[in-house]
Amino acid sequence: MSGENLKRTPLYECHQQLGGKIVPFAGWELPVQYSGVIQEHQAVRQKAGIFDVSHMGEVFVVGAEAEKAIDAMTCNNVATLSDGKAQYSAIVNPRGGIVDDIIVYRYSPRRYLICVNASNADKDFAWFCEHNKFDCEFRNKSSEFGQIALQGPLATKILSSVPGLTDIASLPYFHFQDRKAFGCDVIVARTGYTGEDGFEIFIPSAQTPKVWTELLAVGSPLGLVPAGLGARDSLRLEACLPLHGHELSDDLSAYESGLGWIVKLNKGDFIGRDALVKEKEAGSQRGLVGFLVDDPGIARHGDKIFDAKGMEIGWVTSGTKTPTVNKALGLAIVTSPFTKDGSTFFVEVRGKRLAAHVVKRPFYKRALS
Amino acid sequence: MQFPSDRKYTKDHEWVLMEGADAVVGITEFAQSELGEIVFADLPAAGKAIKQGDTFCVVESTKAASDVYSPIGGKVKSTNSKLSDSPGLINSSPYKDGWLVRLEAVNKADLEGLMTAEQYKTFLGDKA
């Protein structure tokens, strides 16, 4: 990625003021950390953290056949949504591969918001427009929105101390509302990417720095810290939330990459359905697993995986040593006999083959209060 | 930022300290601050012969693995066993408790091309 083409979020100056270490990510300049990845990770698990996720894309779908259009281009069942409810879903290609994983928010059967990944935003929007044969319009509003994620066990307490949002605790998980707060119109969704309770707040770009600053002001006394991409990645990996380009790709089917739970074959036709029906009948040849590394060392994205006889059986999609679990762990795609819990294999790290074994996902699950 | 004057430095931010006939090697304060919290150090086996510039250790943060190049040739005499349980010593004490490798049979001529503390500080300039 060449330096001059990188985009900046509305919060770029805020990150600089906070001493954030800025790195290129998905075409954007974003902070990888402020105080340190481990400290930020722990703060989100124990108290709260805020993340700049303004790089995420926002696409509105408006028109009489909005529901039909989204249903035809995503694998989850849009018809099960009601107004104010959100749904995790995926855009699937004709081979059953994942174009992107998304969240679909329903305002009404004629109006939806779709949140897409930053690195795929342009690709997704082009895909939507190309495949839209319905009476509705896709509008890419990504450049008009900033987005802040407030995550952690104290997220609700912090957000409900903001005037206009004092009742936000009553917003159920995977629901959203248009609200007036921070002197502007915001969309507050009870969603996140850390494995903790929390919110993702869509904000007009110009007001995003004000929201960021006010949240830090009310949250800091309770332990809220700004958190960067490093903590975001280690948190989502412990919670086994997939990342497109790692666990998810155009070349791995929804079943192979662990998204079978959002594939609704009975809902009617959608792009990719035929391929997924065939795969379901025949059985998948490979699948996503979580693993722990037993030998000293850390497995990383792209490391090859071998069985005891030395046959290559897969690859690591994400790997690190994470702060809460405090073990070298990762996610991997392996051939089907090795997808069972307790299976053992070897991850090749810098020429050394490290013993590893498959464990149940996720690595981390929050205690329900 | 600290620059102990008892040792030599490389452009890749390693240091080497002569202790009698042995050379002790680690990474600089600047290096550890750039890498962030280190969660694992992959150290060479005792007895391994190393040339100047060889990748002989890898230090890993939660985000990435980074190569460490040997500032001097020699043979690995021992490695810092405390790092297996406490890799964070490389962050908290990069010049002392966070040392990486002790070399013997060192090629002292390799020291000549390395920087003094003062030269390394100048080399870092505004980054220090």
Image: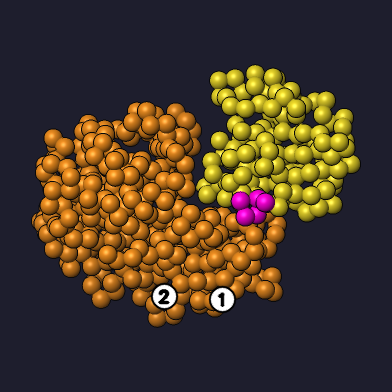
The answer, for residue A309, to whether it is visible in the render is yes
CA–CA distance between discs 1 and 2? 23 Å
Badge 1 is on which residue? A343
Q: Quick one: which chain is orange?
A: A
| Chain in yellow (letter) | B
- Amino acid carrying label 2: it is Glu
Q: Confirm whether the magenta stretch covers residue A327.
A: no
Q: Residue at x 43, y 69 (%)?
A: A361
The image quarter containing residue B126 is top right
Q: Where residue A8 appears, x then y in whole percent? A: 36, 32
**Residue located beneath label 2 in the image:** A279
**Which region is colored magenta?**
B82-86
Kindly identify which numbered label has been placed on residue A22. none
Circles 1 and 2, Cβ within 8 Å, touching? The answer is: no
- Seen at 23% across and 47% down, the residue is A158
**Principal SS element in the magenta part?**
helix
In the rendered image, residue B84 lying in the magenta stretch gets the answer yes
Q: A97 above or below B20?
A: below
* Residue A171 lies in quadrant: bottom left
